[in-house]
Image (spheres, rainbow, N blue to C red):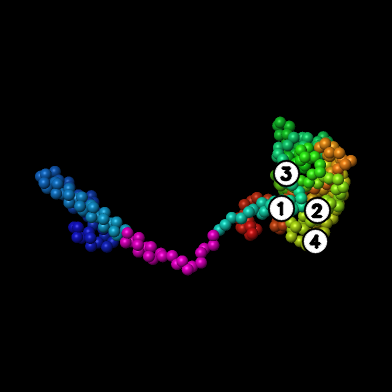
Amino acid sequence: MLEQIEKINSLDELQALYTATFGKNGTMTARLRDMKNLDADARAALNAENATLRDAFKTRQAALENAALMAQLSAESVDVTLDPMPAARGTLHPMTRSLAEISTILHSFGYTRMTGPEIEDDWHNFTALNTPDYHPARDMQDTFFLENGNIMRTQTSAIQIRAMEAHGAPIKIFGIGPTYRREMDATHSPMFGQIEGLHVDKNVTMRDLIGDVRAFLMRFFEIDDVQLRIRPSYFPFTEPSIEIDMKWHGDKWLEIMGAGMVHPNVLRHCGIDPDVYQGYAFGFGWDRLAMLKYGLDDIRKFYDGDVRWLKNNGN
């Protein structure tokens, strides 16, 4: 039997012989059942033979399995001269990249980044910004009010108030962060990113504001020149107030941001003398600028997780 086991060259043959020997109706199984009729020496000899055969089967099985593995590895050898498969890699989301680009540009213009809380009180979000109680911006249709009387920040202008209260004038800062309003359509989201710029100093003029805006747009959109249209507008925290449009793809004008000279009342609320200092402020949604840069007509596409679009816009 031992010699027969050694001559077997396949696992299937080995398994067949093992079953014939140790299976339910195997030869060794039958002999072991009859062990009770044997004397002590014969039982000892049968147990020894049983153990020897089992060890022989295990040894031959291990040898055959190792041989099969070596044959498989030889057949599947790696050709190290082949080009490697391209590895998938992640990239920054276009919104993240846009925010980083905007921050870098404003830093290069001398603005310092500041932040503020997303849950604001009435003073910093409305009153200090010269927004009276009857202003429609306080209406429930626009603002998320909390039970304790605070609100979800509707504008990052609140960061300007906190910055002027803390640092006074002169000051040149920009604030970035999420804001919240009761809006939801193709160009609006109930939570959207907003950027506010503020520059307060002696002899600051509207010309300085427009110059910074023009230079910023040229850098962000990577163009050599930009045509702007300045329209009068109204914001309670600036006087005069303007809206700035940019010419885009031919004769199309697009609203880019709201801006203006800081209202004297806002400066007074922050402890700054408007007879000595004046300044400008501007605000825009960075997601709106990112929509233009990446050619989107629906802001919700930034958040729907379409990997195909993200892959094409990830470089």
**Residue 161, labelled with which disc?**
none
Q: Is residue 77 left or right of residue 182?
A: left
Q: Residues within 10 Å of mark 4 (few under 14, many from 20)?
A: few
Sequence-earlier tag: 3 or 2: 3
Sequence-earlier tag: 1 or 4: 1
Check if mark 1's residue and mark 2's residue have beta carbons within 8 Å. no
Give the residues in magenta.
66-87
Residue highlighted by disc 4: 225
Residue highlighted by disc 1: 104
Callout 1 amino acid: Thr
Which mark's residue is nearer the viewer, 3 or 4? 3
Cα distance, mark 3 to mark 1?
14 Å
Cα distance, mark 1 to mark 2?
14 Å
x, y (%) of residue 264?
86, 40
Secondary structure beneath label 3: strand
Q: Residues within 10 Å of mark 3 (few under 14, many from 20)?
A: some
Sequence-earlier tag: 2 or 4: 2
